[in-house]
Amino acid sequence: MTHRIWNLSAGPAALPEPVLVEAQESLLSFGNTGIGICEHSHRGRAFTEVIEEAESLCRELADIPDNYRVLFLQGGASTQFAMAPMNFLTPGTTADYIVTGSWAKKSVAQAKLFGHVNVASTSEATNFSTIPANNSFSEQARYVHFTSNNTIFGTQFRTEPEEFSDDAFLVCDASSDIFSRPIDVSKYGLIYAGAQKNLGPSGVTLVIIRDDLVESGSDQLASMLQYRTHAEAHSMYNTPPTFGIYLIMLVFRWIRDNGGLTAMETRNREKARLLYEAIDSSSIFHGTAEASSRSQMNVTFVTGDADKDARFIQEATAVGFNAVKGHRSVGGMRASIYNAFPIEGVHALIRFMAEFEHANI
Ligand SMILES: *Cc1c(COP(=O)(O)O)cnc(C)c1O
């Protein structure tokens, strides 16, 4: 078996090992077709079965109501920052945005190209260390946009925003916590997620969108940028990212075989609890996010001394922890512990932190 280390990367991130082993075989021959998965036509029977299974598992895992479409698109979450407002806003109309980090700021900048943005709340004043408790929603917003998990700052919404205008629908960038816990899709109009954190490789964006929004989207846009195009063509308007969709299908099977989203949540809670407990009981590490807003996916922490942080990162890397360095806008350390990151890796990190503390007290 190839030697693998603990990968705490924020994205692209760790994938379940059984998925990688199976994909490895399929690269040479998918099933008994004698043709590798990347070499199959997207219109052929083999791939058609893959994309159909990927969609049906997605629906089963998240209990997606029938009046929602599941799409596998390209261009990452960053394209959705533009595609959502492009389809749903016009120059006179407003969308409410909850600004909880860098990704949210980027989504605001894109929305401003197409309509009016009301920032309902922002936690920028505290360097995004918290999820704002109160929002000033506008009366006539077309939609309310939020980022369910803030990958860089290590904060996460506990529940969906509430008490916004009845006419508005929820739009969520769920890139870094999608399928880490059960989700009530019926509360949303649109959910999107780049796959490379919790679902598969980069290159695929999962989009879950309500039927009436597909219909109400502008038909005056380039075909590739209309949700309608992809909904009507079942994500096959052009050549879809076939390998990525295949890997997502395998990840969905893995989630199902490991107890579904409820079991994912239980595991993720436990992993995060152990790590935060280690941080809170330590005399040199401190969490950067406010406790009530802490993310179960990206655990951010510092020593408060940049040199000590650098030493920790260097020593952790040397013993086999990849990508424990925090994002430059927070500094310090970040451990990304998505679905596929095993609890054994969390135990190993906690042991290493204790050793480091002992040597540096
Ligand atoms: C990584 C990330 C993005 C950017 O995704 P791309 O697929 O690279 O465009 C957007 N939002 C969040 C919350 C992310 O974690």
Image (spheres, helix red, strand yellow):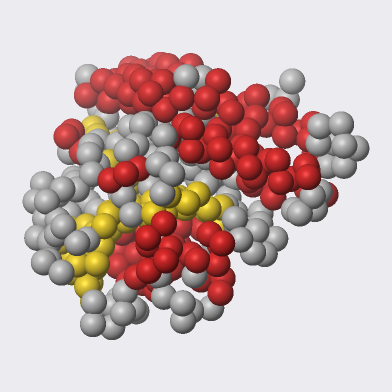
Residue 191 is left or right of residue 101, and the answer is right
Residue 240 coordinates in the image, percent (x, y): 66, 57
Q: Residue furthest right?
A: 34
**Would you say residue 40 is visible in this rendering?**
yes
Residue 67 is left or right of residue 105, and the answer is right
Quadrant where the C terminus lies?
top left
Corner quadrant of residue 104:
bottom left
Quadrant where the N terminus lies?
top right
Residue 170 coordinates in the image, percent (x, y): 27, 54
**Would you say residue 313 is visible in this rendering?**
no
Residue 211 coordinates in the image, percent (x, y): 41, 57
Q: Nearer the viewer, residue 95 or 360?
A: 95
Q: What residue is at 46 percent from the left and 25 percent from the top?
A: 260
Q: Nearer the viewer, residue 153 or 74?
A: 74
In this rendering, is residue 354 above or below 88? Answer: above
Q: What residue is at 16 percent from the left and 34 percent from the top?
A: 292
Corner quadrant of residue 288:
top left
Q: What residue is at 51 percent from the left and 38 percent from the top?
A: 58
